[in-house]
Amino acid sequence: MSNKTPIFRLQTAASVVALMGSLQSAQAAEGAPVLLEEVIVTAQKREQSAQDIPVSIFAITGQTMEERGVLALEDLRDQTAGLELVSTSPGKLSAAIRGVTSSDSSLDGTGAVGYYVDEVPISSYAGSLPEVAMWDAQHVEVLRGPQGTLFGEGSMAGTIRVISNKPDTTATYGRISTQYQSVDGGEGGWGLKGVANLPLSEQWAARLSFTHQDLGGWVDAPELNKSDTNTNESLDARLGLRYEGERATVDLAYLHHSIELGNTWGQTSPSRVEPSSVEVQPGSGIYFSPIRELSTLDDEYDIYNITVNYDFGEFSLVSASSYFDQDSEEQSDLSPNDIVFFGVPGVARSTETGGAEEFTQELRLQSNGDQRLDWLVGGFYKTSEREFSDAFYFSIPAWGFEEYTTLQPFIEREVWALFAEIDYAFDDNWSLQLGGRYYEDDIERYSIDDDSVVFGTVAGRSATVSGSSDHFSPKMTLTWQNDDLVFYATVANGFRSGGINEISSLYPQEVPDLVGPEELWAYELGAKSSLADGAVTLNAYVYHNSWDDIILGLTTSDALYAFRDNAGKAESTGGEVELTWAINEVWRWSVNSAYVESEIKDDVYDSFGGVVVQSGAAIANVPEFTAGTTLDARWPLVKNWEGSAVVTYAYRDKTYSDSPNTPRYQNDAYNMVNFRLGADRGDWAVFLYGRNLFNEEATTQRWSPGFDSQLVYSNYIQPRTLGVELQYNTF
């Protein structure tokens, strides 16, 4: 249990609702209310107000993100009820929405949360999203609940969409920003961001944006006599071209992301990585071996996209084509566990190199305008290839043993889908939305391995293992609404493909070749309200998710390998409340809170009949209770200068990093306080900011590399960080 009781949570939610009773009269006493900014979204593939659609959605504009210091995907977590983003390793995030996540990790897997940049589905490992800077975003949408009809694969829990600013044919302008920050107990770091918009003609325009960061670390490695090792250097760049004709709009985009990390293995204690300080068994007097080198990551990918929208008048045709190309190299030091595996110290490392290529194509026809019957039909196709080489080196001087060996998996996947949705208005208040998506997925995998004493492999190509799955995901929403209220009930189905276990040939009695798909049924009631003449929005949602054949990440009986298997049923039940209030011309206040019980419903057994995950275990990386609040203000200073202040508080309940809920993999509850102060003249602006103001020492992920051992690595949240940012704008 967390240190917040359910009674406290209900009292907190009740207090928020009770507060609303005084808002109408308070606004009337103060005169004309200040209106909240309307956020226009495309969550249903057409432009609509986020407050008017029967979808549980959190939407935030690029301007608001910048004012609040939301610089990257992970920063959205404290702003969004029901969203959990956990750094599984630097540069990679595990995403969960409403307690639904992918608790497995595999080269051929897909995540439970969809992630889109404009019309481009961003691919990555199952359960991980690449951390991409969001400078120059028009807005970001977080859609909660299954989005299988319109967004398909990887959207069983929900979808995150980053919508970028498009090239503008009306004016030439730009801006640039530089920042410097210091981390408590670590090195400083700097960043540079910029955007330039250039009209090329009356119909063509170009836009370039970039974010470069060179951030110092704060984790020391005393066994190597190195300090501040977890450095982070990244570059995100986007080049866009737009053609605007009388009927046709064409967007061409290129996106580049690269990241270099100086130390990825986490920490054995706050701000230190020192395995030789940990006993193999408490009281044994035997300690793990020291690290021999730092574990590093060098990852980059390029995305090319062309989106064409042709307006036929009554309807539009949209074509979105994209190509994704990734290359990465990750080096991991495995030496600390040699004392457990071999009985004596040694040197062990793995170097994983490889890449992925993916092509996607979506075509859809959709009605234009807001008609009594709105409709959309479309098709989707994807083909992907992944090729990796995992090179291992082992050296045990006491045995005179040395081995180089390589494992090379190859994965090919082909997916296609057909989808449709209609929205019929019975009258001015009642409407019914029906949708569905049919999906087929084919996968093939083989590997080329070397002889290995350690892994027990024989040189040669493995047998090809292939699998396929298909599914139909329906959705139905009944809505009643007027100018200020929206009430809806939704039933939706979500689906996530399985895959192939690459180690099944090593453990034929224990590990299945194929992992089946998992399915989720979601039931939701939602209420959206606009109060105090548009100065307040109050939204509340309750839901129940029933999850069948959940895919879990498990380990072999000797604790050497990870694999995946379907493991029965799981459920998540909960609710969210979101409040935003424009108090007056100066002050804005927002509150979000979420509660979810997400747990395994069936005991999970290994192939020998032993229980490895007990019924009632919490889903990994999902906090039971979260809450956040943001208070921001803008006011005149002197002459043309305007002041601004933003304070954000967030609370996250405890979580477990593994499915069995092992006590040593528990992450304790923590609080987070951030601030941002600024002065803005329009052309020049300066900001001071701070994160983790009270320097909490909390973990977000804990694991034991390769073994179920007492050696636990942890990802700690970044220590207190203070910085300054200077901007110049030509708008």
Image: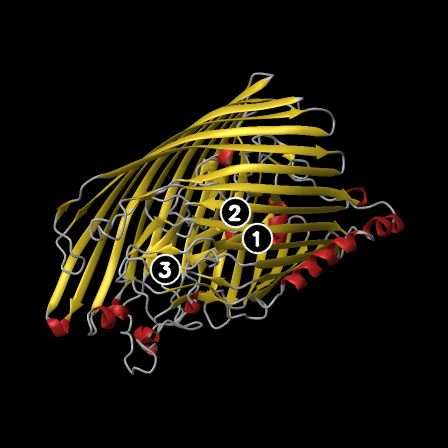
Q: Earlier in the sequence, mark 3 or mark 2?
A: 2
Residue 418 or residue 334, whichever sits in front: 418
Q: Which residue is mark 1?
A: 70
> In which quarter of the view is residue 332 placed?
bottom left
Question: x and y percent of residue 434 in the render?
Answer: 57, 28
Kind of residue at badge 2: Met
Q: Which residue is mark 2?
A: 134
Mark 2 crowd level (few <14, some 14–19, many ≥20, 10 Å Cα): many
Q: Earlier in the sequence, mark 2 or mark 1?
A: 1
| Residue 58 visible | yes
Question: Label 1, label 3: how many angstroms apart (C-alpha)?
Answer: 39 Å
Question: x and y percent of residue 244 in the render?
Answer: 55, 24
Residue 378 or residue 541, whichever sits in front: 541
Q: Mark 3 falls on what kind of element? A: strand
Q: Which residue is mark 3?
A: 612
Mark 1 crowd level (few <14, some 14–19, many ≥20, 10 Å Cα): many
Question: x and y percent of residue 611 in the render?
Answer: 36, 60
Mark 3 crowd level (few <14, some 14–19, many ≥20, 10 Å Cα): some
Q: Mark 1 falls on what kind of element? A: loop
Q: Earlier in the sequence, mark 1 or mark 3?
A: 1
Q: Between tags 1 and 3, which lies in front?
A: 3
Point 27% across, 74% down: residue: 289
| Residue 731 visible | no
Q: Mark 2 falls on what kind of element? A: loop
Q: Is residue 114 above or below residue 574?
A: above
Q: Between tags 3 and 2, which lies in front?
A: 3
Question: Label 3, label 2: how many angstroms apart (C-alpha)?
Answer: 40 Å
**Discs 3, 2 touching: Cβ within 8 Å:** no
**Discs 2, 1 touching: Cβ within 8 Å:** yes
Question: x and y percent of residue 368 in the render?
Answer: 61, 22
Question: Label 2, label 1: how many angstroms apart (C-alpha)?
Answer: 8 Å
Kind of residue at badge 3: Val
